Amino acid sequence: MSSTRLFHEIIAASKPAFEKMCGATPIPRFRAARQSFPTDRVGDVAAAARAALAAPGCLDRIKPGMRIAIGVGSRGIANLPLLTRELAAAIRAAGGEPFIVPAMGSHGGATAEGQAEMLAGLGVDEAACGAPVVSSMEVRQIGETRMEIKGTPVTIPVYLDAAALDADGIVLVQRVKPHTAFRGRYESGLCKMLVIGLGKHRGAMAYHRYGFGPFAELMPKVAAQVLRAAPVLFGLAVVENAYHDTALVEAVPAAAFLAREPELLEYAFSLMGRLYFDHLDVLIVEEIGKNFSGDGMDPNITGTFPTPFAGQGLDVESRVVLRLSEETHGNAIGLGMADFSTVRAFLQADPIPTYTNSLTSRVSCVAKVPLLMPDDETAIKAAIYKSTSPTAEVPRIVKIRNTGNMELIEISEALWAEAEAHPSVALEGAPYALRFDAERMLLPEGA
């Protein structure tokens, strides 16, 4: 008997017990609610990129015949193919010969083929961007950084992608945004791409060796080492608003990375999405995936921080994850931060990218298995049943599609008055009950 079939039989045999315990738990009515966030945005992104690249200390450093490596990461950045194409065209117009290198640490299963496939999945390939993709996991050590961690002096080797290092110049396309596991002046941005993205799997393993605790100090120290030892020219930094519109495009010369990035990070914090409720009994997340967050679901929204180095965030009694996105390709990072999930989500998970990602980051909780329920309806009822909050009799529940889309959400009846009183939340439409199909899987509203 296959392990999958055995697992199905175990869960099926448990259904009567789940039904007896929480099957009668009522699910309250919901209403749609529209949240509003700052709307800073760039009108013509291609024109903004061209204007940004005209800044001194960027394209003017490229000489005819120079081979220029463009570092592109694994995150779903708005307009990424367009930005990469504009950058490649500008490099070519300056006389350079651009090529693209995946700058994504250990993502893509820590293989050259997997990383090239991830770029293609984001729309970044030679046909779309006008520059060939050179994907390799080969790195070379370019130095070392010394620091003290938990009272012990350590020496950390610094690695860089060999293809990028052999180029005459390195440029980056990267979004600047808050990290999900630590706080510092440099979180997810240009420095992180230099350090972990272009460090490939070997570099990511070396920098994560001591966990996220040292990252606030480690990130700028290693980035400074890379800037000294490698031919980094500039980075095309992007900031997005909560609606995934490009809010800013700026070309930052390499010499200004360490000074400018903290300012861009502060701006990114001011634009990000969130939930305008402080306490919930249940948060239902319909889908998680690496295309929404490095942690599957963004802890800056859900409060599911995997380390103590980031923050507390939203106060939630129970979190429910119903499925994985197709775009995450089986990487189930984040599932372990749910309290309840479904057999469907578990069977969507591929242990190879999930465990590779988890072990590289030295964070195991994100890859654990939550309480698995046979279907969506049972998972939601179990989460409501489990709540020990004084408000659990009239549960405060928010349902979101994913943490990448925070404008339109669904809220239970206990939150309606609070939503009506909030200046950035507007209720929409009539109340409704959640509907499920014959297999007790959630149906989309209006289906």
Image (cartoon, rainbow, N blue to C red):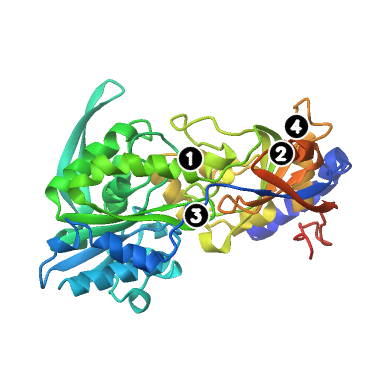
Decide: is 333 above or below 138: above
State which tag comes first along the sequence, 2 or 3: 2
Q: Which label is found at residue 387?
A: 4
Question: Which numbered mark, 1 or 2, is in the foreground of this view?
Answer: 2
Report how far apart the C-alphas of labels 1 and 2 lie in the structure.
Answer: 24 Å
Q: Quadrant of residue 438?
A: bottom right
> Who's the residue at 80% across and 56% down the image?
440
Quick one: SS at disc 3?
loop
Dot 4 and dot 2 residues touching (CB under 8 Å): yes
Amino acid type at image mark 4: Ser
Question: Which numbered mark, 1 or 4, is in the foreground of this view?
Answer: 4
State the residue in front, 340 or 49.
49
Question: Which numbered mark, 4 or 2, is in the foreground of this view?
Answer: 2
Residue 304 image point, x, y percent: 56, 38
Amino acid type at image mark 1: Ser
Seen in the image, is 281 located left or right of residue 151?
A: right
Please identify the quadrant where the N terminus is shown.
bottom right
State which tag comes first along the sequence, 1 or 4: 1
Residue assigned mark 1: 364
Residue 10 image point, x, y percent: 74, 50
Quick one: SS at disc 2?
strand
Amino acid type at image mark 3: Lys
Q: Which label is found at residue 290?
A: 3
Dot 4 and dot 3 residues touching (CB under 8 Å): no
State which tag comes first along the sequence, 1 or 3: 3
Seen in the image, is 227 located left or right of residue 186?
A: left
Amino acid type at image mark 2: Val
Residue 82 image point, x, y percent: 38, 69
State the residue in front, 30 or 12.
30
